[in-house]
Amino acid sequence: MTQDLRVKKTQAAIHHAFWKLLATRPLPKISVADLIAEAQIGKATFYHHYVDKFDLARQLCQQTQAPLIQECAKRIASHQLHRLFLPLPDAILQDASHIRLLDTIQTPEFNGQTHLIEALTTSFQRSLLARDPTFSQPQAVSLELATLYQHVVIIDLLSAPMTQMLALQQAIPVLFAKP
């Protein structure tokens, strides 16, 4: 079932307001009143779509990070883990500012860094087990890989010098080489 155009426009307005406000101040300093004023919607409309600002942040985080996580899963499925550290596709880099903004959210209710690491860990664990069902300690390896990858993604999104990316790309196959 396709969404009503009014719903799409309302959600787009709320999302735009969220990103605009988050670029100027931390999430704890953004109120629902700020969001509805910026989006030019009513309070009831906001609460029809979201439970609170943290629900909005979670949903936008999932929506923004989904292409990145899918790209990671695709790269792991290729059986060449070093491909994880190749530059990201332009489609993902278009959301770079949003991914960086989400990375700044660190509250008890929602933590952008933790959310990305948990999503990557789950994706990596599934991919590693799909490659080798007897893989020992997939959770621990996936968590380490996800944490490393999260930092690399942020470096990539901040346009780090290509030499750093190439050094990481060369180091990864060594880490996962079979004895």
Image: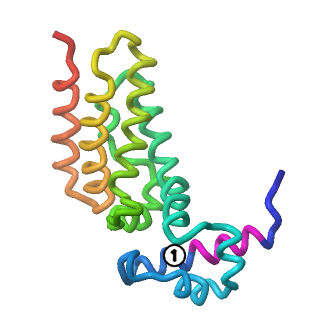
Q: Is residue 111 above or below residue 86?
A: below
Q: Mark 1 points at which residue?
A: 18
Residue 12 among those drawn in magenta: yes
- Image quadrant for the C terminus? top left
- Picture coordinates of residue 37 (x, y %)? 59, 89
The foreground one among 100 and 114 is 114
Q: In terms of image quadrants, where is residue 119?
A: top left
Q: Is residue 130 above or below residue 53?
A: above
Residue at disc 1, secondary structure: helix
- Picture coordinates of residue 8 (x, y %)? 73, 68
Range of magenta residues:
7-15
Q: Is the magenta stretch mostly helix, strand or loop?
A: helix
| Residue in view at x 72 percent, y 73 percent | 9
The foreground one among 90 and 73 is 73
- What is the basis of the colouring in this image? rainbow
- Picture coordinates of residue 70 (x, y %)? 50, 40
| Residue in view at x 39 percent, y 32 percent | 124
The foreground one among 90 and 144 is 144
Count of numbered labels shown in the rendering: 1
| Residue in view at x 20 percent, y 18 percent | 177
Q: Is residue 149 above or below residue 38?
A: above
